[in-house]
Image (cartoon, rainbow, N blue to C red):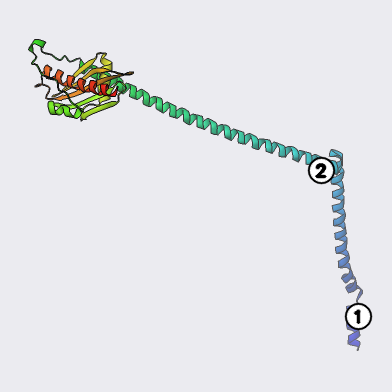
Amino acid sequence: MSLMLSHLQALLSPAQVMGDYLAPLIYLSFLSLGISIGVLISFIYIIRMIQHGGTPREVLEKLSHLEEKAEKLEDSQGGLSSSVAELSASVKSLQESLMRVDSRLTSLESRVTVLERRGVRELRETARTVSYPRPSQLAKVEAATIKDLNEIVLHFPEVRYAGIITSQGYVVKSYGQPSEEPPKMLEVLRISGTPRVSLIRGDRRLEVFYLGDVKDLSIYGILEIEDSVSIDEAKLEAIKETINRYFRSVVSKSQ
């Protein structure tokens, strides 16, 4: 019994009881102090805001107004950026168009240069004189009458190519395979400024001669003869007259 009482006295000693109640009081005191400090800081912050910018409501209104201005500026910047992008695309398209035009001009210049060189070369070749025998020395050769240009080889086997071409370079009728392009031969005739042109290419002889006019077009004959050495001028004239007869026959039937 006395042991129990001594134990209870130890448990209920003033120091122990004071320690059990003092700890919560100290905690509550620090908590209250912290809350007070926080309220004081908030109060000081509000006072400073009122001193510099008016009431908190006015400050909020100013902040809202600044946000609206910022949004408008962002919208304007976005519109300007889109306009700049469209302008850049237009400038790029214009640059591409200019590059295409420049490349076409360069191509045309190169073609003109090639044609000029060909013309000079052809004129030099046409400068070669072709000797023709006197008319009294020519043997009489009769021209043939044909219904189609392909029949010319039946009367004159020396003919490798015969053709009829317009002044615009369109081949109306032809026989055989030429060694030179007919429009190119026609261009040589135009450069020479004469109604006929004779060229010697190895063992071949090329002739371009005027046939007549149909409406607004001038018509020319193109002739290529093999073994140009053995053929005489009378036979050559007979072959050209045969082509001329065929041309006049076709024109008379079309009228």
Q: Nearer the viewer, residue 46 or 154?
A: 154
In the rendering, at what x and y percent does residue 143 appear? 14, 20
Label 2: state its secondary structure: helix
Q: Amino acid at mark 2?
A: Leu
Q: Which residue is mark 2?
A: 60
Contact between labelled residues 2 and 1, with CB atoms less than 8 Å apart: no
Q: How many marks?
A: 2
Q: Amino acid at mark 1?
A: Gln
Q: Quadrant of the C terminus?
A: top left
Q: Which residue is mark 1?
A: 9
In the rendering, at what x and y percent does residue 13 appear? 91, 76
Q: CA distance from mark 1 to mark 2?
A: 65 Å
**Residue under the point 15% across and 24% down:** 225
Tell me if 87 is positioned left or right of 173 in this view.
Answer: right
Tell me if 53 is positioned left or right of 147 in this view.
Answer: right
How many residues crowd mark 1 within 10 Å: few (<14), some (14–19), many (20+)?
A: few
Residue 134 visible in image:
no
Label 1: state its secondary structure: helix
Q: Quadrant of the N terminus?
A: bottom right
Q: Indicate which disc, 1 or 2, sits on the residue closer to the N terminus.
A: 1
Q: Nearer the viewer, residue 17 or 40?
A: 40
Residue 191 visible in image:
yes
In the image, residue 22 sits, relative to residue 192, either above or below, namely below
Residue found at the very far bottom of the displayed protein: 1
Report which quarter residue 111 is drawn in: top left
Q: Nearer the viewer, residue 236 or 190?
A: 236
Q: Nearer the viewer, mark 1 or mark 2?
A: 2
Report which quarter residue 124 is drawn in: top left
In the rendering, at what x and y percent does residue 67 appear? 75, 40
Residue 240 marker: none
**Residue under the point 75% across and 39% down:** 68
